[in-house]
Image (cartoon, rainbow, N blue to C red):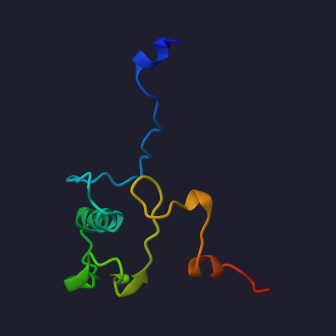
């Protein structure tokens, strides 16, 4: 069976206008590394002098990310993510929204 529609290319979702497009992207980069790069790029673009840390251990996924001394939790989903959210959360993070029982 042949399908001429395959020759026309793939349809994809449009990139939202508010999306941050990284100037320098490595396809093998970890999700946290991409998030940190996007934050740095956006802070520079907006000329915001906010601290981003921990400065000496920024790429360590075991450490909380701090933006202006406020902890930021990174949750990623999609290709390359350790656990896509489409199937729901499991483990300790899933219990955060429960009311007990």
The quadrant of the image that shows the C terminus is: bottom right
Q: Is 66 situated left or right of 10 in this image?
A: left
Q: Which residue lies furthest to the right in this view?
A: 101
Query: In the figure, 37 relative to 52: above or below?
Result: above
Q: Residue at x 67, y 78 (%)?
A: 97
Q: Which residue is drawn at 35% across and 88% down?
A: 69
Residue 58 occupies quadrant: bottom left
Q: Where is residue 37 in the image (x, y as percent from the top left)?
A: 26, 64
Q: Nearer the viewer, residue 61 or 23?
A: 61
Q: Residue 11 at what x, y percent from top left?
A: 46, 29
- Label total for image: 0
- Residue 85's place in the image compared with 96, above or below, is above
- Left or right relative to 75: residue 24: left
Give 10 or 40, whichever is nearer the viewer. Answer: 10
Instruction: Give the x, y percent position of residue 19.
Output: 39, 52
**Pick the front one: 15 or 49:** 15
Q: Name above or below for residue 22 compared with residue 12.
A: below
């Amino acid at each position: 069976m042949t399908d001429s529609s395959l020759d026309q290319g793939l349809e994809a979702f449009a990139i939202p206008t508010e999306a941050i497009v990284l100037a320098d992207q490595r396809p093998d980069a970890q999700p946290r590394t991409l998030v940190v790069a996007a934050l740095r790029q956006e802070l520079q673009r907006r000329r915001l002098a906010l601290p981003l840390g921990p400065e000496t251990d920024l790429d360590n996924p075991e450490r909380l990310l701090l933006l202006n001394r406020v902890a930021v939790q990174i949750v990623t989903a999609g290709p390359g993510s350790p656990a896509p959210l489409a199937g729901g959360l499991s483990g300790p993070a899933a219990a955060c929204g429960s009311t007990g029982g």
